[in-house]
Image (tube, grey):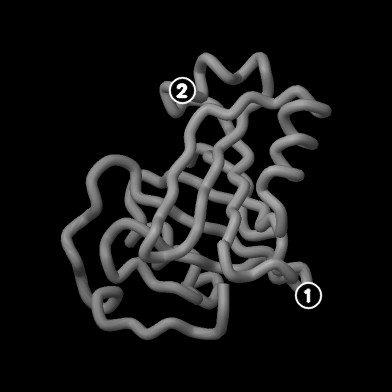
Amino acid sequence: MKFLHAMIRVADLDQSLKFFCDVLGMKEVRRTQNEKGRYTLVYLAAPEDAPEAKEKHAPLVELTYNWDEHEYAGGRNFGHLAFAVENIYDVCARLQAAGVTINRPPRDGHMAFVRTPDMISIELLQKGAPLPPTEPWASAPNVGSW
């Protein structure tokens, strides 16, 4: 398993970038805007990690700016920790056998979400290309929120 990023939802992207980049000294290494989903993702790296982060080898902070949502209650502003795994189906099966609820099953062979006992979301991403859809995951429903 490899740690990828921690995500935080932000209410004001410019204000957040000013804090993280101008004040804290982090470097923007990647940005994605999604018109259909109405959000912007900005990935930041610590100054010493920035060269490696451009190659996707360093841990990042992901700022998520949802264009239509600016207030987050109940800790929703902290999104998740993300880890790349060798085989998402094997990891989810192991977690489920240990009593962990798979909140967002890996139906696509690429992504799943679980929660820690403290309700922190953990995103699991398949390393490399997605695995072919496989039962029981392909038809498994979402459970709760992630």
**Residue type marked 2:** Lys
Residue 30 versus residue 89: which sits nearer the camera? 30
Q: Earlier in the sequence, mark 1 or mark 2?
A: 2
Residue 73 versus residue 91: which sits nearer the camera? 73
Mark 2 residue element: loop
Instruction: Tally the numbered discs.
Output: 2
Tell me how far mark 1 sits from mark 2, CA to CA. 33 Å
Residue 103 screen position, x and y as percent: 50, 76
Q: Is residue 117 visible?
A: no
* Residue drawn 74% across the image and 70% down it: 71
30 relative to 26 in the view: left or right:
left
Residue 84 screen position, x and y as percent: 44, 44
- Badge 1 is on which residue? 74
**Residue type marked 1:** Gly
In this rendering, the answer to whether 86 lies above or below 137 is above
Residue 131 screen position, x and y as percent: 22, 55
* Residue drawn 57% across the image and 62% down it: 66
Residue 110 versus residue 7: which sits nearer the camera? 7
- Badge 2 is on which residue? 54
